[in-house]
Amino acid sequence: MSQIVAVLNGPNLNLLGKRQPEIYGRETLADVEADCRRVGAGLGLEIEFRQSNREYEIIDWIHDARGRTAGIVINPAAFTHTSVAILDALHAFEGPIIEVHISNVHKREEFRHHSYVSAVASGVIVGCGTQGYALALQRIATLIGTKEGA
Ligand code: CA2
């Protein structure tokens, strides 16, 4: 039976592939979702893929994941650098959390170097482009011990 993994995306990621391709590449968020579903299926994971520009909605989705989903992959986008509320919500989640950033935030402006979310993440994937999502799912599969991810 497949286990569920929530893949949560923060503000402006709906614009992926439509602006700033030099930073974020040409894949759209729909492409990333399709990749996650394909890779997830191979790992025995069912993917719940979501994006919001609203902080409270991401917090509600994290609460909703408790006791129901085996892991969370999260790209909190700009909320990474600002949101104690998302950090607090993630603290209440019992499974593995992998934080993903498409760009290498450490090569960019100083304000992108700090992440509130990293304090609670099992792992962080930075600067691997949209492939970071697939890598994060592989890591979750290993951590939760699905047969396919072992
Ligand atoms: O590199 C990442 O994945 C980020 O989480 C993306 C965030 C940024 O605030 C973080 O520092 C790093 C920005 C997401 C906005 O994405 C856009 C994509 C295309 C066009 C405009 C924004």
Image (spheres, rainbow, N blue to C red):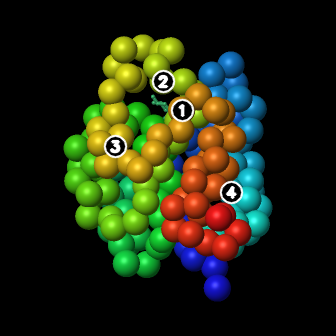
* Amino acid under disc 4: Cys
> Which residue corresponds to mark 4?
36
| Left or right: residue 32 compared with residue 89 | right
* Amino acid under disc 3: Val
Mark 3 → mark 4, Cα distance in angstroms: 21 Å
* Image location of residue 43, percent across then percent down: 70, 66
Mark 4 → mark 1, Cα distance in angstroms: 17 Å
> Which residue corresponds to mark 2?
105
Return the residue nearer the eye: 111 or 140. 140
Is label 4 or label 1 in front? 1
- Can you tell which mark lies on residue 113? none
* Mark 3 Cβ inside 8 Å of ligand 1: no
Mark 3 → mark 2, Cα distance in angstroms: 14 Å
Picture quarter with the N terminus: bottom right
* Mark 2 Cβ inside 8 Å of ligand 1: yes
Instruction: Tell me if mark 4 has few (under 14), some (14-19) or many (20+) residues whose alpha carbon lies within 10 angstroms of its own.
Output: many
* Image location of residue 51, percent across then percent down: 52, 53
Residue at image coords 51%, 61%: 143
Instruction: Tell me if mark 2 has few (under 14), some (14-19) or many (20+) residues whose alpha carbon lies within 10 angstroms of its own.
Output: some
Which callout, 1 or 2, points at the residue further toward the start of the chain? 2
Helix, strand or loop at mark 2:
helix
> Which residue corresponds to mark 3?
117
Which callout, 4 or 1, points at the residue further toward the start of the chain? 4
* Image location of residue 123, percent across then percent down: 45, 45
Helix, strand or loop at mark 3:
helix
Helix, strand or loop at mark 4:
helix
> Which residue corresponds to mark 1?
126
